[in-house]
Amino acid sequence: MSTVTLPPPNLPALPESDCATGTPGDGYHREGAGPTVALTGRETSKVGYGSSEQMVARRSASVWTKLHPFFALGQLLAFCVSVGLLIGYFRGTVSFDVVHQSVLAKVALMVGAIVTGALWEKDVFGHYWFAPEFLGEDTMTVNVFILHLGYLAMVVAHPENVTAQIGTLIVAYGVYIANVAQYILRTANLGKHVAVRVRSR
């Protein structure tokens, strides 16, 4: 699952001559790269879940490929709104109760993104969580989710300590930003890799 929890890049499978190299974590096989999936021709992957063509077919057939982005992008939008409200709180124009409601909306969308992302990952890679192709993304998603749960626990345990709640929220949002950033960089690098190989043919 992603989980950014953002949807994985919808990139075409590379032909046999283009699948010999890649970068760690991009889903392509590099000689000696360990547990990454080998997408050479019609060989099965090292994790035993089919060829590149089969993975692309499963991705296209999965209903979660279309549904997951609604939750992932909705969470990103809720995050932007929440950050704006948090800035308003620091300026004295918004109450923290309003900020808290925006966090609840973000958490709800995050749960939807996690669930649909896990179902997508199961359809495509045979794992609900921590498929080798999405190990980094899933690890980051777990960290983000735990930090958001920490914020909610802080609200319940210490409702009067708004300073501690804000501190926990800022840390959670910081890790969420890092998660989004690594997904964008991974997608950009993978797209560049494919574009270069297409031009070189």
Image: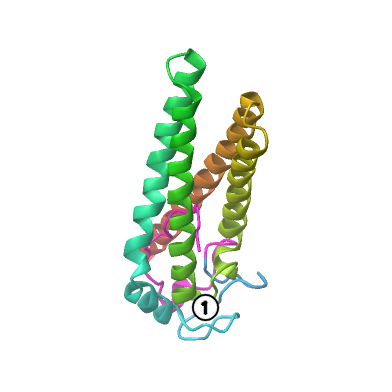
Above/below status of 58 relative to 196:
below
Which quadrant of the figure has residue 132? bottom right
**Residue at 48% of width from left, 20% of height from top?**
89
**Front-lying residue, 172 or 159:** 159
- The amino acid type found where label 1 is placed reads Gly
The boundaries of the magenta stretch are 1-26
User: Is residue 156 one of those drawn in magenta?
Assistant: no
Q: Which residue is mark 1?
A: 126
Residue 57 percent coordinates (x, y): 36, 78
Above/below status of 127 relative to 195:
below
Q: Which residue is outermost to the top? A: 92
In-image side of 68 versus 118 (left or right): left
SS assignment for the magenta stretch, majority: loop
Which quadrant of the figure has residue 21? bottom right
**Which colour style is shown?**
rainbow
The crowd level at tag 1 (other Cα within 10 Å; few <14, some 14-19, many 20+) is some
**Residue at 41% of width from left, 52% of height from top?**
72
SS for tag 1? loop
Above/below status of 121 relative to 181:
below
**Residue at 61% of width from left, 55% of height from top?**
142
Residue 167 percent coordinates (x, y): 64, 29
Residue 14 percent coordinates (x, y): 41, 72
**Residue at 50% of width from left, 64% of height from top?**
1
Residue 185 percent coordinates (x, y): 50, 48
**Front-lying residue, 124 or 186:** 124
